[in-house]
């Protein structure tokens, strides 16, 4: 319907109501629907540099946490499937707010700088930055239209691979024991 000029919101509402005015055949609709449902249960692929970064951060003695707004059990399952669970000290489920990140810092008793690596400016980077964490933005492949511009949020670092994270954390300092790194699910 949007291909015919209908606004995206109107097309979505019409499709939701079960409108039959589609350009796709019934077979195509079923194929697309099945692909979507399969993708929902598929194990996601790790982001570029994930394994390298996690190994290096572990060697540096960093405390690694996953902060997620999703279901903790699902995140644990995915971490197990990717064989990444051993890297993480804890998975914390909750609405990402500055208060959540402040509680995480208090809980971990972080003596060194803490970092948040995130792929969403509004859901990961802004609340972590507001809580006083250094922020590392790793843009994802999907950017909703409501996402604020980078210049408005101003992440401390922008990366194209997670393999860049250890160098950022080390910076000019030789030791990094005690640093907390939060990685979103």
Image (tube, grey):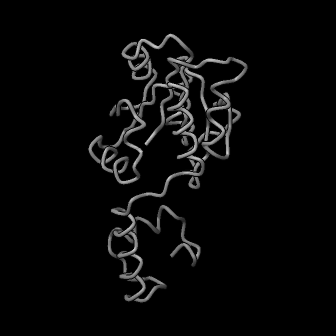
**Residue 151 at what x, y percent from top left?**
71, 34
Q: Is residue 18 above or below residue 154?
A: below
Above or below, 18 against 165 in this view is: below
Q: Residue at x 55, y 25 (%)?
A: 115
Residue situated in front as seen by the camera: 154 or 152: 154
Q: Quadrant of residue 22?
A: bottom left
Q: Is residue 57 above or below residue 23?
A: above
Residue 4 image point, x, y percent: 57, 78
Quadrant housing the C terminus: top left
Say if 144 sits above or below 117 in the image.
below
Look at 59% across and 47% down and name the residue there.
Answer: 49
Question: Residue at horizontal 67%, vertical 27%?
Answer: 156
Q: Going by the picture, which residue comes out furthest to the front?
A: 59
Query: Which quadrant would residue 12 be assigned to in this image?
Result: bottom left
- Left or right of residue 106: residue 77: left
Would residue 58 be found to the left or right of residue 94 on screen? Answer: right
């Amino acid at each position: 319907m949007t291909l015919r000029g209908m606004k995206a919101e109107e097309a979505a509402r019409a499709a939701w109501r079960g409108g039959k005015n589609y350009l796709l055949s019934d077979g195509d609709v079923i194929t697309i629907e099945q692909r979507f449902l399969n993708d929902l249960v598929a194990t996601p692929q790790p982001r570029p540099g994930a394994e390298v970064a996690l190994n290096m951060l572990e060697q540096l003695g960093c405390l690694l946490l996953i902060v997620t707004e999703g279901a903790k059990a699902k995140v644990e399952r995915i971490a197990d499937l990717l064989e990444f669970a051993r890297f993480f000290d804890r998975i914390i489920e909750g609405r990402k707010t500055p208060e959540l990140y402040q509680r995480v810092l208090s809980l971990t008793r972080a003596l060194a700088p803490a970092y948040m690596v995130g792929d969403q400016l509004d859901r990961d980077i802004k609340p972590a930055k507001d809580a006083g964490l250094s922020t590392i933005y790793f843009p994802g492949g999907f950017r909703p239209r409501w996402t604020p511009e980078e210049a408005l949020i101003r992440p401390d670092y922008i990366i194209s691979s997670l393999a860049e994270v250890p160098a950022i954390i080390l910076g000019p300092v030789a030791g990094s024991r005690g640093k907390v790194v939060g990685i979103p699910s």
